[in-house]
Image (cartoon, rainbow, N blue to C red):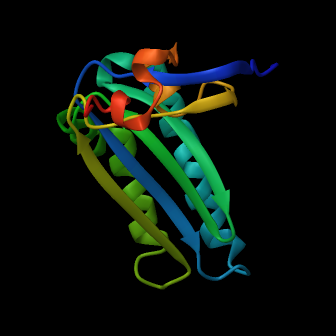
């Protein structure tokens, strides 16, 4: 699949409140492949399921890889939607598997952070990029004179 690059400067037009959910794992013991690989593989089916069911409130996800860490930044319509999914069947199964196979043995760490963002409390800039982050979760629009600075995009002129 070819990635479309959008030449020029763009921002995201976010018209409602939303939630940013950051979730990830840290490989604490590199040699314990049989412990951390299943944890890493568990996220894919959940993300696929979320994209197939937009009515659940999931908007978009971005993956980031770092040394020992895999992070997903997710965008959700609301905290209630995120919480409903977290209490659902697929996530409960993944959490149960993690607890049974890893528990507190220290080989794999997991983390998450949730941020509730009110309308008008975020801004974004994308220059010569494919659609990404907020620009992919919401609508990506051209930067104009009216929204050319972060302050103007936050409507704090």
Q: Position of residue 118 (x, y in %)?
A: 20, 35
Q: Position of residue 16 (x, y in %)?
A: 24, 22
Q: Position of residue 122 (x, y in %)?
A: 33, 37
Q: Is residue 110 at all visible to an observer of this figure?
A: yes
Q: Quadrant of the N terminus?
A: top right
Q: Is residue 141 above or below residue 134?
A: above
Q: Is residue 120 above or below residue 71?
A: above
Residue pictured at 35% horizontal, 36% vertical: 151
Q: Nearer the viewer, residue 85 or 66?
A: 66
Q: Quadrant of the C terminus?
A: top left
Residue pictured at 33% horizontal, 57% vertical: 113
Q: Position of residue 18 (x, y in %)?
A: 27, 32
Residue pictured at 37% horizontal, 59% vertical: 112
Q: Nearer the viewer, residue 30 or 15?
A: 15
Residue pictured at 56% horizontal, 81% vertical: 107
Most extreme residue toward the right, as rendered?
2
């Amino acid at each position: 699949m070819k990635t479309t690059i959008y030449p020029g400067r763009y921002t995201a037009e976010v018209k409602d409140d939303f939630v940013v959910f950051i979730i990830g794992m840290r490989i604490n013991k590199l040699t314990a492949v049989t412990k951390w690989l299943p944890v890493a593989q568990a996220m894919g089916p959940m993300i696929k399921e979320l994209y197939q069911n937009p009515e659940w409130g999931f908007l978009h996800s971005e993956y980031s890889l770092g040394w020992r860490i895999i992070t997903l930044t997710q965008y959700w319509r609301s905290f209630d939607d995120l919480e409903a999914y977290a209490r659902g069947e697929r996530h409960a199964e993944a959490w149960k598997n993690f607890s049974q196979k890893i528990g507190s043995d220290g080989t794999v760490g997991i983390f998450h952070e949730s941020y509730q963002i009110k309308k008008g409390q975020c801004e974004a800039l994308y220059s010569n990029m494919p659609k990404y982050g907020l620009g992919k979760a919401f609508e990506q629009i051209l930067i104009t004179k009216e929204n050319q600075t972060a302050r103007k995009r936050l409507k704090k002129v």
